Amino acid sequence: MRFVLMLLPACLCAQGDLTGSWINEKSETAGVTQVTLRRDGNRMLAHVWGSCRPVDCDWGEADVELWNGVPMAIWKPGFSTVRMQFIPQPDGRMLLAYRSEYHDDSGRRDLGQAEYFARKESIAEPADAAGARAVLRAVGEAYRQLPSAYFEAVETEYRKVGKSEIRNITRTKAYFSAPDKVRSERAGDQEPVVQIADGQTLWSVYPDSNEYAKVPQGRDGSSLVNAYSKLDQVRGLPKIVGHERAADADCTVVELAMEHNAKRTLWIDDTTHLIRQDNLDSGAERQETMYPLIRLGEKFDLQLFAYDPDATHARNRRAMARQAPVTLLGQPAPDFTLHDLDGREVRLSELRGKAVLLDFWGAWCGYCREALPGIEMIHRGLKDKGLVVFGIDSEEPETARDYLQKNGYTLTSLVDRKEDVVRLYHLAGWPTTVLVDRDGKVVYYGTGDDPQKLREALRAAGVW
């Protein structure tokens, strides 16, 4: 149910006890999956989890207050402000109504969402879970009280694609200055990025292209520190499965049975209660994160946590993406050279004289999967009229090939592993469709949400 969130009559809020855990009745929701409401003295707190893969995203807790008689909580993760209402129903269910206001320069709008939740039955945990919970509480407290610190992390991601397994490695250096300043430098198979939280603003800096994006920092500061500071509230059934050494530290090993049949294993330093290894296994995908180096009590030059885009004449990436449908339309299409899934080189400028449709997609993107059948139909129906259709995907070639073959798609997909062409065309999101006419000019740029405009552009290009 989509609607503009507005003042709801107080009569909907039949006085009832909302405390406890609630599960979304819509199991395949793309929104909130679970809510836990609890009392802390005179306060009521809401803990929310949102739909993510391989496990749900933990939004953390927020205070619940009455707004015109209706309980409401507000989350401020930085890039958005989410207002959420908790409305008891006569049949014992709860209606959750929420809307996001975005602060990320994307220009996107949220009309709001409302979904029904049912109470989750309370299940008694086995006796061996208590010891594991105590260890996780020590971890949460250690990260909440963390002094200034330096971390090095190595994240290895394994994906099963058909009979193959793909491995990607990302290395991160993170500097944390209590209470709310952080700098992380990430490098791997994709574009390097430096994230700087200066206490007010979270900057994403892209050195290779001299571009940046920014959002308000939000309440939670560093994502690494924040994520581990909430481990004592984590969902899943924990148990201690052993004691081992990891990253040259004696560790207690805690295993968590998570949602979506995922399993998470944590190696927790017995001395500092910090995480030294964090493995997440969801079957088709595994993530192994090692922290080989942690130094506590570091003193940093505060310039590490400052960024001034004017100093390097950096460009605002999201502002360019928001303006792209206007600034690129009617202009020569930015040229590029990519390889298809069989390694053949494709150069856009060499296709002058033909109309070219570019569909930026990904197997991970639900909206892309919905749009691909229409793109395939255009490819099959118009290829003999002078239209060339290319998908452009930033995933591993094996992932794209496996998805296209399984679904019977015949369009050619190009590999943009470092997202060079994504940046060249200033994408704001996926999917995005671009039509280049026979003269090499951009004549359509959109998300495909208006098929009539795309048909008109194809007709004007002489291929419909």
Image: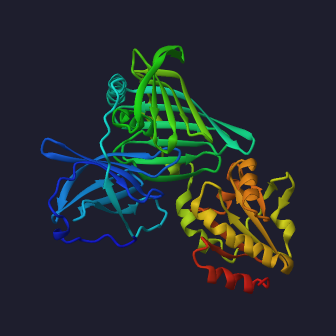
Residue drawn at 18 percent across, 64 percent down = 13
On screen, residue 383 above or below 395:
below
Q: Position of residue 90 (x, y in %)?
A: 22, 65
Q: Position of residue 319 (x, y in %)?
A: 53, 63
Asked whether residue 305 is in view, the answer is no
On screen, residue 396 above or below 80:
above
Q: Where is residue 97 in the image (x, y as percent from the top left)?
A: 32, 64
Residue drawn at 81 percent across, 56 percent down = 340
Left or right for 256, reference 459: left
Left or right for 376, reference 129: right
Left or right for 351, reference 161: right
Which of these two is toward me, 306 or 280? 280
Residue drawn at 39 percent across, 70 percent down = 1
Q: Where is residue 406 in the image (x, y as percent from the top left)?
A: 73, 57
Residue drawn at 34 percent across, 58 percent down = 82
Total tally of numbered discs in the picture? 0
